[in-house]
Image (tube, rainbow, N blue to C red):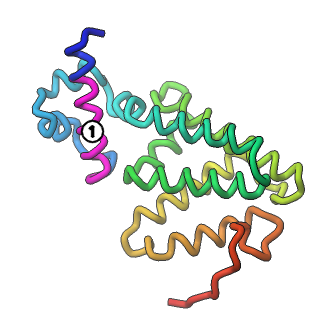
């Protein structure tokens, strides 16, 4: 790729990241092109579909989350590694409103530009879950697909302004439901007192 084309592509990705973080994944490609001071044709030349744009934008983050999971497999306790990865995934997916809906669809659609990254990410979480199950610290009636669905559910919760204040507490509830050592909420912290709102 020529240097000027690479510069345009990188600029489009920078702008797309900011616009999608602000307005969600359903923002129009025309709006992204307008904000980047480039034409829609230029954007489509680099990214022919919304999913191609998202895959390029999210590729680095997918890779980082997968690498962190691989690193966690050899460091720390199985339950801490699993909860830490789950928390990282949920935090990352809430950066881009609506991305979990696309990820959930992409995991089943082999033609999706996001499919391979989503499958790799799910497999990374599944390995951490399997390790925790083998150590007897995670329930054995869930699998990687369930874990991926829980990430999507918790991220969706964080996307809802009226429910976002409950997200941290409900994350702890879900983590303690996954782990079999539920005394500490599975998070290495003392359980929080229950607050009814």
Which segment is the magenta one? 8-23
Q: Quadrant of residue 57?
A: top left
Q: Nearer the viewer, residue 47 or 189?
A: 189
**Placement of the N terminus among the 4 image quadrants:** top left
- Residue 155: x %, y % from top left: 49, 58
Q: Is residue 39 left or right of residue 13?
A: left
Q: Quadrant of residue 48?
A: top left
Q: Nearer the viewer, residue 196 or 91?
A: 91
- Residue 35: x %, y % from top left: 14, 40
Q: Give the residue pinned by disc 1.
A: 16
**Helix, strand or loop: magenta stretch:** helix
| Numbered disc total | 1
Q: Residue furthest bottom?
A: 196
Q: Look at the numbered disc 1 and give the secondary structure of its residue.
A: helix
- Residue 151: x %, y % from top left: 58, 54
- Residue 56: x %, y % from top left: 39, 29
Q: Using the image, determine if residue 175 lies above or below residue 52.
A: below
Residue at image coords 50%, 75%: 166
Residue at image coords 48%, 39%: 61
- Dot 1: within a 10 Å radius of its alpha carbon, few (fewer than 14), some, or many (20 or more) residues? many
Residue 90 is one of the magenta-drawn residues: no
Q: Residue furthest top?
A: 2
Q: Residue furthest front?
A: 75
Q: Is residue 27 left or right of residue 62?
A: left
Q: Is residue 17 left or right of residue 103?
A: left
Residue at image coords 70%, 53%: 82
Q: Is residue 129 left or right of residue 96?
A: right
Residue 18 is one of the magenta-drawn residues: yes
Residue at image coords 76%, 57%: 79
Q: Using the image, determine if residue 68 lies above or below residue 77.
A: above
Q: Using the image, determine if residue 160 lies above or below residue 127.
A: below
């Amino acid at each position: 790729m020529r240097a000027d084309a690479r510069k345009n592509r990188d600029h489009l990705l920078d702008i797309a990241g900011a616009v999608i973080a602000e307005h969600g994944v359903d923002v129009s490609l025309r709006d992204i092109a307008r904000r980047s001071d480039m034409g829609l044709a230029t954007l489509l030349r680099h990214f022919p579909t919304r999913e191609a744009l998202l895959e390029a934008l999210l590729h680095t983050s997918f890779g980082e989350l997968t690498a962190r999971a691989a690193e966690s497999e050899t460091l720390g306790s199985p339950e801490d590694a699993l909860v830490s990865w789950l928390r990282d995934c949920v935090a990352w997916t809430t950066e881009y409103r609506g991305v979990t809906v696309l990820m959930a669809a992409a995991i089943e659609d082999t033609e999706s530009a996001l499919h391979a990254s989503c499958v790799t990410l799910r497999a990374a979480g599944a390995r951490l879950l399997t390790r925790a199950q083998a150590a007897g610290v995670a329930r054995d009636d869930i699998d990687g697909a369930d874990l991926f669905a829980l990430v999507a559910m918790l991220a969706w919760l964080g996307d809802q302004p009226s429910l976002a204040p409950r997200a941290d507490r409900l994350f702890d509830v879900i983590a303690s439901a996954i782990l079999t050592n539920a005394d500490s909420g599975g998070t290495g912290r003392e359980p929080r007192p229950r607050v009814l709102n």
